[in-house]
Image (cartoon, rainbow, N blue to C red):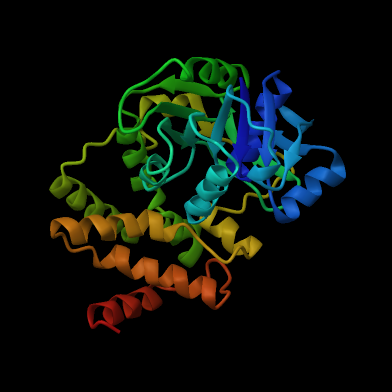
Amino acid sequence: MRVVVYGVGAIGGSIAARLALTGTEVLGIARGRMLDAITRQGGIRVVSHLGDELARFPVVADASEVDWRQDDCILMTMKTNDTSEALQHLLEAGVERQPVICAQNGVANEPMALRFFPNVHGMAVMMPAQYTEPGTVVAFGKPKLGLLDIGRYPTGCDDVLGPLASGLQKAGFICTLRPDVMQVKYGKLLLNLSNILGAALGAEAQHGPWYHRLRAEAEAAYAAAGITVENVDADSPRRAEMKKTPINGVEEVGTSSVQSLTRGTGTTETDYFNGEIVLLGRRFGVATPVNLAFTRIARKMVLERMAPGCLRDADIEAELCSAAHGR
């Protein structure tokens, strides 16, 4: 089995690096400054409680440059904003029946992939990681680097997942086969609703009143849609196996949305986090004004190149008012 990691960022880079360092054959698909840095330094630097390591594995710029094999396992680790384009590139490159594993936050990637590929799997990723410097990723999890639940989409498990799970276990992760993996991913989505809070208002807002309002709307939408979830909150017993732990000499930047704004990527995933709740609300008749307001705020921050943490509660209230009046 060869693992093709499509999207070498915080999550993809950490997983790819640790797999390569522990003997799994890995190939990466990267772009931009990350690709340039990996090429220049001869590998990707991964910093964790296990040390400061340089992992070497081949990296290309596009799916068309891969000599695709039947035993390839494709790990999709790009942001959801880039999934549709990546899937098209896989199609154009001749990928057909190789397993496509959506190791991404949110719940929109799997149905996108299933439109084109028959063997789609979801992976719920609980892994505090960051990428702000090209060529370097940081994984803060300890004692395990991350909790990775994996299962076939929409439900079930199959034989292809066993070797991958074994490789991930060896690499320092806990990987659990889950026929109900989407329940875990919907649980993780509840946590990701706070990403935009860290980006807009600062880290201290992530667990405050705004988050409770976002989550209450989401839980009402889930109930109306008949969606059941698994608890992956900080009080989940499983979280004792992977705690976010500071690393000496590393400054923690914040959520993935903060990292996107810091790097100036031109996108955040808010439309696929809070926007997913807006979508459910519109489908099942549940009001979700706070989640809608934060999707609008995220777009404004990207378009106006706002710095993370620059907004205040009054700005959010103004956006709520504006959204309520259709402006």
Residue positioned 13% across, 49% down in the render: 224
Image quadrant holding the C terminus, namely bottom left
Indicate the position of residue 64 as horizontal and vertical percent values.
66, 44
Indicate the position of residue 185 as horizontal and vertical percent values.
36, 38
Q: How many labels does the image show?
A: 0
In front of the other: 302 or 5: 5
Indicate the position of residue 37 as horizontal and vertical percent values.
80, 49
Residue positioned 34% across, 60% down in the render: 275
Left or right: 104 as drawn, with respect to 235: right
Left or right: 68 as drawn, with respect to 110: right
Image quadrant holding the N terminus, namely top right
Left or right: 319 as drawn, with respect to 35: left
In front of the other: 31 or 64: 64
Residue 261 to residue 147: above or below: below
Left or right: 291 as drawn, with respect to 223: right
Residue positioned 68% across, 50% down in the render: 251
Indicate the position of residue 317 as horizontal and vertical percent values.
32, 76
Residue 265 to residue 4: above or below: below
Tell me if residue 10 can be seen: yes
In front of the other: 208 or 37: 37
Residue positioned 52% across, 49% down in the render: 88
Q: Which quadrant of the structure image shows residue 149?
A: top left
Tell me if residue 231 can be seen: no
